[in-house]
Image: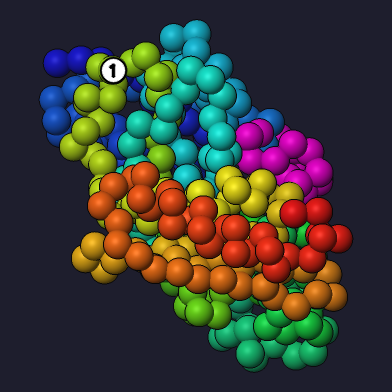
Amino acid sequence: MSHYTIATRESRLALWQAEHVKTLLQERGHSVTLLGMTTRGDQILDRSLSKVGGKGLFVKELELALEDGRADLAVHSLKDVPMELPPGFSLACVMEREDPRDAWVSPRYASLDDLPNGAVVGTSSLRRMALLKSLRPDLRIEPLRGNLDTRLKKLDEGLYDGIVLAAAGLKRLGLEDRLRSAFEPEQMLPAAGQGALGIEIRSDRTDVRAALDSLRHLPTLLAVSAERAVSRVMGGSCSMPLAAFATLQGPVLSIRAAWGDPQGQLPLVAEQAQGLVSDEASAVALGEQVARALQARVPVTSGA
């Protein structure tokens, strides 16, 4: 039996995710403790992530704990993990995906279509802003930062007519009753990796990698590898309004990607492809193919 320490953010959702991995490892005979940490991404709530350093703000402190030996692994929402990890770190395990869709949450309106003209919708995701503007150009999109509970509290205080959240987070915390409706991917394409958990380790920790073997989910890995390849080629981060979503049916991987304008001034640009995949490399290659097609169509003025 081995003992492992999991580094995790201290939000309720992050702790649920870490406890989930802890339970699975304990079921396999390991001893596991949690190391709760507050990241800069959790501390800076008055500005959008795209303006203060991006998604890496949610993982840097956890990586420092891995580096100095205080922790052996870190559990992340995969959509929060930068496309390129620092030297010496590896994404050792991608677990089976939860619902990848975006969720519509509102105490008054059952769906986006029910909103009156000029209604206020909360999100700080440039991707969601762009897709919402393409669906409803009349909406007022207002910033919404904080953990899931904080966002729901702001909604309940009447600051928004509705907000958009990841369905996976609501389901993991048993808050399905707050989910008024889910956006199908055809309507609002998810972010790369949305709904999946990724486990990061130091690259030299082969013992931890081996302990995580049975937690890996190959279909999810292939899908998110293609999605993250789109973001990597596009230079994607939270500072780019980019969506990418892949599904696997047998050996056939289908992927769609979209770039949009958060201001709603430019039309949505979308590309898709499908192909046979047998491993991570072929999934990445398909994602890169879609990204290059998307790059060719994104307006130069976008900075993409």
**Image coordinates for residue 20, horizontal then vertical, percent:** 31, 41
Which colour assignment does the render follow? rainbow
The structure residue drawn at horizontal position 35% and vertical position 65%, both measured from the top left corner, is 275
**Image coordinates for residue 25, horizontal then vertical, percent:** 22, 31
The structure residue drawn at horizontal position 63% and vertical position 34%, both measured from the top left corner, is 56
Q: Secondary structure at mark 1?
A: helix
**Image coordinates for residue 252, horizontal then vertical, percent:** 29, 66
Residue underneath mark 1? 206
Residue 41 seen anywhere in this rendered image of the structure: yes
Relative to residue 91, is residue 137 drawn left or right?
right
**Vertical side of 74 occupied by 258: above or below:** below
- Indicate the amino acid at tag 1: Thr
**Vertical side of 61 occupied by 121: above or below:** below
Query: Magenta region: which residues?
Result: 42-57
User: Magenta includes 183?
Assistant: no
Please identify the quadrant where the C terminus is shown. Answer: bottom right
Viewer-side residue, 298 vs 228: 298
Question: Could you say which quadrant of the image residue 99 lies in?
Answer: bottom left
Relative to residue 45, is residue 292 drawn left or right?
left
**Image coordinates for residue 82, horizontal then vertical, percent:** 58, 39
**Vertical side of 171 occupied by 55: above or below:** above
Viewer-side residue, 234 vs 111: 234
Relative to residue 111, is residue 249 drawn left or right?
left
